[in-house]
Each structure stands twice: as structure tokens, then as C-alpha cells.
Amino acid sequence: MQGDICDPDRPAHPGIFPAGEAGQSDHQPAELTVDFPVSVVLPAGGTGERTGLQTPKQFCSFLGRPLISYTIQAFERVSWIQSIVVVVAKENVDLMTDIIQRFQHRKVRVVPGGSTRHRSICNGVLALGEQEEGERLPTDRPKVVIIHDAVRPFVEEDFLYKIAIAAKEQGAAGAIRPLVSTVIATTSEGYLDHSLERAKYRASEMPQGFTYDVIYQAYQRCTESDFEFGTECLHLALQYCGTNAKLIEGPPTLWKVTYKRDLAAAESIIKETLSRSACVITGGSAQAVTLADAFQKAAGALDMELDVVPDLMGDNGRYLSKEWNFIQVSVNHSCLSEVESLLMDLEAANRALLHPLVVIWVHLSCSDELSISRKMPEPAAIMDVASSAKLRNILVYAIQLHQSKDTERWERSVLRVAEITSALIRERSPALVGQLLQA
Ligand SMILES: Nc1ccn([C@@H]2O[C@H](COP(=O)(O)OP(=O)(O)OP(=O)(O)O)[C@@H](O)[C@H]2O)c(=O)n1
Ligand SMILES: O=C(CO)[C@H](O)[C@H](O)COP(=O)(O)O
């Protein structure tokens, strides 16, 4: 953990996260503005056959939220994107509509997909030029359409910006990555025919951007064979509109969830992104502040940003609006009033809507006051508070720590608190909710 105070308004995360919850970059420009209308098509109409799962991968859940919701969030947080069309199979339109309502997504329309990816994307592009149900005026066609697979949740605003600008200037633009394996051609008998010079080729990834006119015309002019077997929108723009796409190397996080193992990798990135920062609330007590300071030092190696505040009043209320985890330190208070008050603030701020939030209650007992038994928190009371918070998507854990005059012993305990805290925040295990751990 870093001890220095850093900007709590930093973009939360990439994709997963608010303005980048999962995978956000540390060096995102302060504000990127685009002075032309940009809309997005997210093809999400596939079955995810290669995962081997019954559920299409875009509807698989991570920390209680489907993958498609993380991808939508990556786009809706971008102020210069005016609308998002999500294309899903007809039988999933109701499910998708429910996801949009449950996670309060904005700017989103759902459109039925087709039997292939190109057919789904084409439906999305056509929908951008159509009047929305219930609207009296025709929808403004966007100048630029960004197309992005719904199963690539970790896309950053700065990269979308580069694609949008290049698409407006060139007519088409797309993300590329270096090849990790050499591409070879095989004979029909299964022998090597020839191999390509790897350095000359790139993998085509998403997002891709097009002016509306280019992508619209490309789909008007392409053949049934393109719709059935094609895999590359940039190719359609070249072949049917003569538009050579600008290619821009993107970050490795643009990778597509394709196999079952990719779902595990996505979950791990999401958890990692949610574990980047914690806010320690001391209540202003001198012992709690000393503990928080020691905690910061001990936590130095755990790679987490740690801010210390007395409470969440006034300007400190900003911690409630971003992706922070919370550590409430109580000294000799065996009652849970401070945690309960924090939980009320978090609920009022609607902080647990998009993913489970972690609150850790660190109970510090100082042996030179009161009797030890009077200072011990009641495990059943902690479990009650935690169980009720869990229903509201807030994961409450507790750690008991005894102050020691023996410096070595004290330092070991503080280090244990830092390690337990870090593990609880990273794992977000529902099974450990309400447990009182000893440091
Ligand atoms: N008829 C289709 C097929 C695919 N897609 C979408 O295109 C994106 C990329 O395709 P891919 O990874 O191939 O997804 P699936 O077709 O679902 O996977 P698989 O090929 O393993 O079945 C996915 O978001 C997928 O939902 C789509 O909108 N409509
Ligand atoms: O990388 C891409 C560039 O167009 C597409 O995402 C890809 O072609 C679609 O996925 P798949 O081929 O696996 O259906």
C-alpha cells in the first residue's frame, strides 16, 4: 500500500469499473472531449460455444454482475459517447433489458441480433439510424460508430478516444496487437503449406471505429457470404468502400473472453481492480491514528493505496462516491455503532450497486483500560450486522487486535492486520462475511 495521499477522484477502473474499474490506467488524461456525435454497437448475440458452458459468456456473472454489464459500464462512463446499442439474441432481449434496469445503465438500447456476428453488428448499425420507440423526432445519426465485442470488458477511455478521432479522420480505425504465435497455412492433407513472416502481421482486435456512412454502406454492399463467414469489419470497409483503416496498437487488456479460462482471468482482473484502494477511518482517536500510521508502513509492500481520514464528513464525503474499500478502526468500543453508521452512509450513496463493497471493522483493544472482557466485540452481533449488510451487497469482516507495549509483538500484529485486510479486500469472499479474525 502507498502511504501518500492521492487523488480519490482518479478514474476508478477500466471497464469493470467506473471510468475504468477493471484495468484503468494511471495516466489517463484529465478530460478527453470529442466534438462530434459518437455511438457504440456492442455485439452480444453469440452463444459462446467455445467456453463449453450453457450460459453465453456475456451473461456469465462476476461478483454478482454479468460480464456485459461491465462492458456497458466501460462505455457509459465516457461523457462524449451519446448512445450504446447492445445487440442480443431474440430470446435474450428480456434478460438484457432486466440487466440494464437492475444495474441502472443509461444511454443503452437493446436490439435483436442475427445468426452471425456480422448480422448482429449490422442490426446494431441500422438501429442507430432509426427512430427509437416512443420518440417523435428521428434519432440523430452519429458521425462515428464504435464497434466493440461485448466480451472485451477492459477498454479504456483514452484508447476509445484514439479510435474515435482516427475513425473520423480516416473513415475507419481499429485496434491491433502483436501476434503471439506464427500463422501458418496448411494443406488439405494437414501438412505445412507455408508460414507467414510474423513481424509483418498483426492480430486484429476491438474496438474498431467507422464513420456512420462507411459502416452503413459496407453492410449495404457486402455479400451473403461476407455475412455468413466474415470475421472482420475493417475488411468490409476496405472492400466495399475503399477505406483503408488506420491501425492503432492497443493495450493487452483488449483481449477477448473466448474460452472458459478467460472467464477466470476476467474475474481475477476485476477483483484486482477493485482492490486498489482503501480508506481508513480513525474516528479521530489518537490510538486509532497511531494504528493507521503503523498500518500504512506495514502495508507498504501490499500494493494498495491507503488514505487515512478521521471521518467521512464534509470534503471526506468524496470517498463515498468512488471505488474505495473501507477500514473502520474502533478503539475499546465493543459496540458496532461506527460500522453501522458507515454502512448507512454507503447505502445512501448507492455504493454497492455495481459490485460488492468491502468494509473491515478493526477493533483495537488497549489493555490498560477497562477489563478485557468488556472490550471484546460480541461475535453474534458482528454476524447479525454483516448478514444484513450482505443482503445489500456490502461484505463486512472484523479483525480483533490487542495493543501491546512489546514493540516487536505490536509490529507483528499490525503487519498481520495489513495482510488479513489485503486478503479480505482482494478475495471478497462471501463465505467469510461476519467472521471475527484475530491479528
Ligand atoms: N451471432 C452472433 C455471434 C457473435 N456475436 C458477438 O460477437 C462477439 C465476438 O464473438 P465470439 O467471441 O465469437 O462470441 P461467440 O460467437 O458467442 O463465441 P463462440 O464462437 O465460441 O460461439 C461476442 O460478443 C458475441 O456475443 C453476436 O453478436 N452475434
Ligand atoms: O477480433 C476481431 C476483429 O474483427 C473480432 O473480435 C473477431 O473476429 C470476432 O471474434 P470471433 O472471430 O472469435 O467470432
Image: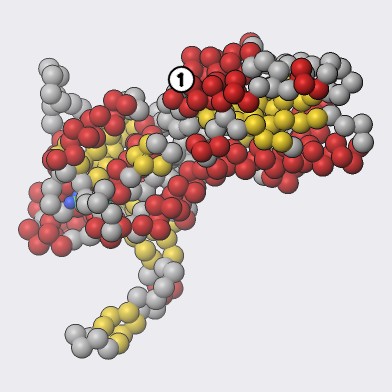
- Residue hosting label 1: 350
Q: x, y percentage for residue 256?
A: 36, 54
Q: How is the image coloured?
A: secondary structure
Q: Position of residue 352 (x, y in %)?
A: 47, 26
Where residue 50 sits: x, y (%)?
28, 60
Residue placed furthest toward the right: 406
Question: How far from the left and from the top, in percent, is residue 140?
Answer: 20, 27
Dividing the image into 4 quarters, which one contains the C terminus? top right
Residue in the picture at 32% in, 26% down: 102
In the rendered view, does 46 fall on the left or right side of 404?
Answer: left
Task: Identify which residue is drawn at 28% across, 54% down.
Answer: 53
Q: Is residue 324 above or below residue 145?
A: above
- Residue shown at 60%/33% (left/top)? 435
Q: Give the vertical position of 12 relative to 61 (above or below).
A: above
The amino acid at mark 1 is Asn
Residue 246 sits above or below residue 360 on the image: below
Residue 12 seen anywhere in this rendered image of the structure: yes
Q: Foreground: 315 or 418?
A: 418
